[in-house]
Image (cartoon, rainbow, N blue to C red):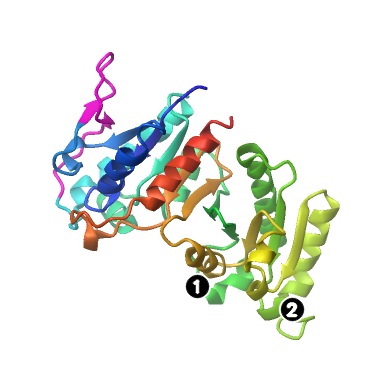
Amino acid sequence: MNQRPVAVTCGDPAGIGPEIAVKAFQEVGNTIPMVWFGDPRHLPEGTIWHDVTHAGKTSSGLPVHPISFAASSTSGKPTLENAAGVVRAIDAAVASVQAGTHCAVCTAPIHKQVLQDGADFQYPGHTEYLAHLGGVTRPVMMLACPELRTVPLTIHIPIRDVPDAITGDLISETVAIIHADMVKYFGLSTPRICVAGLNPHASEGGKIGREDIDLIGPVIAQLRQQGFTISGPVSADTMFHPKARETYDVALCMYHDQALIPLKTLDFSGGVNVTLGLPFVRTSPDHGTAFEIAGQNKADPTSMIQALKMAFDMGHKV
C-alpha cells in the first residue's frame, strides 16, 4: 500500500497544537506516517525532529516540513506576529496534498481573531479557507466518532436566524455531498441519512411550527424519489439513542448544537471534525486552541489521534 503521510498543520503555536501533534506522533507515528508543518522553534522543548525537505536525511524523530515564522512563541500567549506563518503552514500542507505528496491534511486548531487581526484573514474559519484553497463554494462539516456521524445544516449563526437559513437547495446540496463522500471515503454503497426536524417533535403535524411540514418534509420526499436513502424529518429527541443510531449512517441536523451535543456526549475526547465536499481529505480534532492549558503537558491528544487515523484511512481510499 502507498504509505503517503498525513500533512499535519501546526495551528496557533501558542495553543496546544504542537503539543498534541508530538503526543500523537509518539503514540501512532509507527503506524500512521505524518509530517508536521510548522516552525520547529514552536515544538515542545526536547522534541526530537528531522527536516523532511532535506533529501536523504532520516531520523527517528518527528518529521517536520519547516515553515518560517516571524517570532518564537510563548505557550498560552498568542501573538499577531505569527499569524501569517499559521496561514503559510496551512497553504503548504494543502499544496502538498493537492500535489499527491501527502494523502490528507489534518489541521490543528487556529484562533480566528488572531489570524484576522494579524494576517488580514478574510474567512470565518478554517473550513471556509480550505474551501477557498480547494475551489469549492459549499463545504460540509461533519463530526464523527465510532458511535455517530452528524452534520449540522447550519453552523455558526444565531438560533433566531436558523429557520430563515434553511432552504430546499441547502438541504438538497448538503445531502448530495454527504452521500458522495460516504461512498467515496467510507465505503458505504448506499449511505443511510436521517434528517432531524427543526421544531420539537418535528412540528407534531404542524402544531409546533410549519417548517418541518411545509419545507423539510417535501424536500426529503423529493430526494427519496431521486434515489437517496433518506428518512425524516424525525423528532431530534428520539434519534440518538442506541437503537435509533442503528438505523442510519449519518444524521443531518438543522443547527449547530442539535448536531454537536449528542456527539460530544457520546465521545467528548475522541470526536473528529471532517470537512466533506473538498477535492482533498481534511480532518481536525474537535476542540480549540486551549490557550489556558498550553505548555503544561495537560492536553489530551485523543481527538488528534482519531483525526489522524481518519485522515489516513480516508486519504488512502482514493
The verdict on residue 54 being magenta is yes
Of pointers 1 and 2, the one earlier in the residue sequence: 1
Q: Give the secondary structure at mark 2.
A: loop
Q: Is disc 1 surrounded by few (<14), some (14 to 19) or many (20+) residues within 10 Å?
A: few
Q: In the figure, is residue 275 to the left or right of 27?
A: right
Q: Mark 1 and mark 2 in contact? Answer it, CB < 8 Å.
A: no
The residue lying at 24 percent from left, 23 percent from top is 59
Residue 10 in sight: no
- Could you tell me residue 170's position as x and y percent? 66, 57
Q: In the figure, is residue 4 to the left or right of 258?
A: left
- Could you tell me residue 31's position as x and y percent? 41, 32
Point out the image quarter for the C terminus.
Answer: top right
The residue lying at 51 percent from left, 68 percent from top is 261
Q: Is disc 2 surrounded by few (<14), some (14 to 19) or many (20+) residues within 10 Å?
A: some
At label 2, which amino acid type do we have? Arg
At label 1, which amino acid type do we have? Pro
Q: Main secondary structure of the magenta part?
A: loop
In the image, the segment drawn in magenta is: 49-73
The residue lying at 41 percent from left, 41 percent from top is 106
- Could you tell me residue 76's position as x and y percent? 19, 58
State how many labels appear. Answer: 2
Q: Give the secondary structure at mark 1.
A: loop
Q: In the figure, is residue 157 to the left or right of 39?
A: right
User: Eyeballing the image, is 27 above or below 78?
Assistant: above
Where is residue 224, by image quadrant?
Answer: bottom right
Residue that mark 2 sits on: 210
Mark 1 and mark 2: Cα distance apart in space = 20 Å
The residue lying at 75 percent from left, 65 percent from top is 232
User: Eyeballing the image, is 111 above or below 60?
Assistant: below
Residue that mark 1 sits on: 158
Residue 94 in sight: yes
